[in-house]
Amino acid sequence: MINNLRFELSFKNISQLENKLNFCKLHKIKNINIPCKGDIKKELFNSTIKYISKNFQEFNVTYHYSLYHQYSKNKEKSFQDFLDFIKNSYLNSNFEILLVSGSHKKKNFDTVDVLNNIKKEKNLKVKFGIAYNPYLRQYYNEFSERERFDRKISSGLINSIWFQYGTDIKELHNEVNYIKKAANFKKINLFGSLLIPSKQFIARFKFRPWRGVYISEDYLYSLEDFYEFTRDLVCFYKNNNIIPVIETDFSSSKKLSSIYSFFRK
């Protein structure tokens, strides 16, 4: 399972990106994700694609594309920008696009809308992933996630599902079962977010919880219990053929070793 792990990179400029990519090379990490949030959007996001395509083609890259953060002027201009992004991505043969609506959906320009428009385009050969939050219905009283998933999967363009992080394995199990049935058990790759707990992370999350991310109070007040949950989640991912995506900083040998410890018996 360690060899299949994916690592999400966080950086503020191309110099930091270069350092992290070289760290990945040194530690034989091949599977990386480039998010589209915070500082990584617009010009830096586009520059990142060009930089990786030119200098680090050995990586298997998943680019997150936030329709919210990349929105520009109007939906027509934004859709053309997205098409240009896809074409630029072709420079790297090992890539996939995780298409996300973003924290605030744009009217008539979210993932469902864009997938419907993409179907009309010819000669576009690209693999799309979509995000799925298993905890919205139970913990946030949002009941549209399944309906939106059905509309996305019906596009015929979906290659992978990416599960949001949370700490209710029972609820996750229910939604994974639903996903598999709704997709008619087709060959679709499954990925799951994984955060490695720490005192620093807990303090930050208590101060400013992440939108749509459910973490039980039990784990926010017991690091030991949080560790135990993480081991259970890793086990669940393994048993359900879900590839973990490490969203915790890993850019030191010590941090990387700590992450790997959760995957060793």
Image (spheres, rainbow, N blue to C red):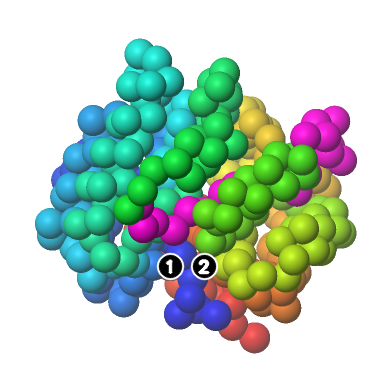
Task: Say what secondary structure mark 2 lies in.
Answer: helix
Q: Position of residue 153 (x, y in %)?
A: 64, 52
Measured along the vertical axis of the image, is residue 190 above or below residue 27? above
Confirm whether residue 129 shows in the render.
Answer: yes
Hey, which quadrant is residue 61 in on the image? bottom left
Q: Residues within 10 Å of mark 2 (few under 14, many from 20)?
A: many
Which quadrant does the C terminus fall into? bottom right
Query: What span is colored magenta in the figure?
Result: 124-144
Count of labels shown? Answer: 2
Q: Residue at x 52, y 67 (%)?
A: 259
- Identify which residue is drawn at 84% across, 54% down: 171
Residue furthest to the left in view is: 54
Q: Secondary structure at mark 1?
A: helix
Q: Is residue 128 magenta?
A: yes
Q: Between 17 and 63, which is closer to the camera in this rendering?
A: 63
Residue at screen point 32% across, 39% down: 83
Q: Quadrant of residue 12?
A: top left
Disc assigned to residue 259: 2
Residue type pointed to by label 2 = Ile
**Image location (x, y in percent) of residue 95:** 34, 60
Q: Mark 1: give few (<14), some (14-19) or many (20+) Cα within 10 Å.
A: some
Please give the label number shown on residue 119. none
Q: Are marks 2 and 1 in contact (CB under 8 Å)?
A: yes
Q: Which mark is residue 256?
A: 1
**Of the residues shown, which amino acid type is indicated by label 1?**
Leu
Residue at the image position 87 percent from the left and 40 percent from the top: 138
Q: Is residue 153 left or right of residue 115?
A: right
Farthest top residue in view: 73
Relative to 94, is 126 above or below?
above
Q: Position of residue 155 (x, y in %)?
A: 59, 49
Q: Quadrant of the N terminus?
A: bottom right
